[in-house]
């Protein structure tokens, strides 16, 4: 991430405040998960305030490299490893969608999916399915030049 990517660019005060809160949520979540990183992007790489934000997370081994992508907002806060297959925000959204669909399948099969606690599985499965579908729609719209 270059220095200019670390400048504040969100001009709407409400959106900027929301982004600050979401960044704090992501940082706290990554710490809880034991993800050792070199920092979360100052602002989301993409967002739809106040619903969804995608964050770049620097690799500790190479701080100029994105090691993970994180997501927050009106979705489960989550992160995934950056790979060569993830080239744009639409790819990030698709990757989270896939990860959540797989987690919902595990829950459906009575397995612990790594989200929340096993006690809230009944509530979590439909949420994951709904949000996975939403992310796929956003990804498709981004690929078509929308959003």
Image: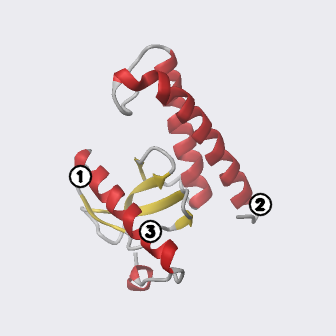
10 Å crowding of disc 3: few (<14), some (14-19), many (20+):
many
* Residue to which mark 2 is pinned: 144
Residue 60 x, y percent position in the rendering: 24, 62
Q: Secondary structure at mark 2?
A: loop
Q: What colour scheme was applied to this rendering of the protein?
A: secondary structure
Residue sitting at 43 percent across and 23 percent down?
A: 121
State which quadrant residue 49 falls in.
bottom right
Residue 35 x, y percent position in the rendering: 26, 50
Q: Would you place residue 132 above or below residue 51 in this image?
A: above
Name the side, left or right, on which 73 lies relative to 29: right
Residue sitting at 52 percent across and 45 percent down?
A: 96
Q: Secondary structure at mark 1?
A: helix
**For marks 3 and 2 on the same chain, the one whose residue lies earlier in the sequence:** 3
Name the side, left or right, on which 100 lies relative to 1: right
Distance, label 2 to label 1, CA atoms, is: 35 Å
Residue sitting at 46 percent across and 53 percent down?
A: 71
State which quadrant residue 63 falls in.
bottom left
**For marks 2 and 1 on the same chain, the one whose residue lies earlier in the sequence:** 1
* Residue to which mark 1 is pinned: 31
10 Å crowding of disc 2: few (<14), some (14-19), many (20+):
few
């Amino acid at each position: 991430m270059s220095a200019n990517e670390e400048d504040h660019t969100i001009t709407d005060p409400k959106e900027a405040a929301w982004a600050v809160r979401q960044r704090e949520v992501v940082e706290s979540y990554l710490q809880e998960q034991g993800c050792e990183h070199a920092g979360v992007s100052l602002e989301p790489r993409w967002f739809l305030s106040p619903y969804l934000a995608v964050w770049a997370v620097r690799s500790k081994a190479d701080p100029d490299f994105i090691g993970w992508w994180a997501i927050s907002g009106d979705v489960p806060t989550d992160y995934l490893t950056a790979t060569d297959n993830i080239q744009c925000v639409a790819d990030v959204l698709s990757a989270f969608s896939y990860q959540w669909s797989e987690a919902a399948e595990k829950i459906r099969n009575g397995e612990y999916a790594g989200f929340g606690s096993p006690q809230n599985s009944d509530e979590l499965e439909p949420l994951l399915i709904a949000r996975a579908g939403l992310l796929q729609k956003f990804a498709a719209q981004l690929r078509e030049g929308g959003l």
